Amino acid sequence: MRRPNREETPPAACVGCGFCCLTDQCEVSHRLHGYLPRCPELAWDEGGSRYVCRLIAQPRCGVDLAPLFVGQGCCWRDNPWRGDVRRRG
């Protein structure tokens, strides 16, 4: 996951579309689970109609979440999934 730098357009708020986690497993998940085609920590929240990261929702002792850049938003404003948030395979 790429952290936006200050010279770029500010990131847009995360809408929970799942694009990042479904297309590129994060460093934290990779360390915990090894390489997988889909992050096992990604869950669809039926009540909220968005994806959530279990690593964030249920933090584990000793797991460094800093590489996730939580709360810093989406750094790809042109992400086609942003306007079509739905459960994807």
Image: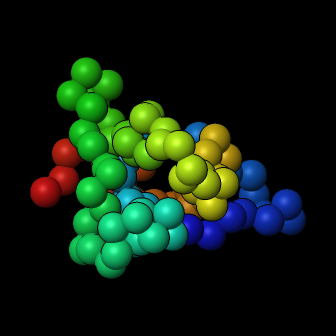
Q: Nearer the viewer, residue 4 or 61?
A: 61
x%, y% of residue 55? Answer: 44, 46
| Residue reaching furthest to the left | 89
x%, y% of residue 34? Answer: 34, 75
Q: Residue at x 31, y 61 (%)?
A: 39
| Residue reaching furthest to the bottom | 35
x%, y% of residue 50? Answer: 32, 36
Relative to residue 45, is residue 43 depicted above or below? Answer: below
Q: Nearer the viewer, residue 57 or 89?
A: 57
Does residue 55 appear in this view?
yes
Say left or right for 29 vs 7.
Answer: left
Say left or right for 15 vs 73.
Answer: left
Q: Nearer the viewer, residue 66 or 14?
A: 66
| Residue reaching furthest to the front | 62
Q: Residue at x 41, y 71 (%)?
A: 30
Q: Residue at x 21, y 28 (%)?
A: 46
| Residue reaching furthest to the top | 47
How many numbered marks does the figure carry? 0
Residue 85: quarter of image: top left
The quadrant of the rendering that contains the N terminus is bottom right
Q: Residue at x 59, y 40 (%)?
A: 13
x%, y% of residue 45? Answer: 27, 32
Relative to residue 61, is residue 69 depicted above or below? Answer: below
Residue 58: quarter of image: top left
Does residue 12 appear in this view?
no
The quadrant of the rendering that contains the C terminus is bottom left
- Is the image coloured rainbow, by chain, by secondary structure, or in one colour? rainbow
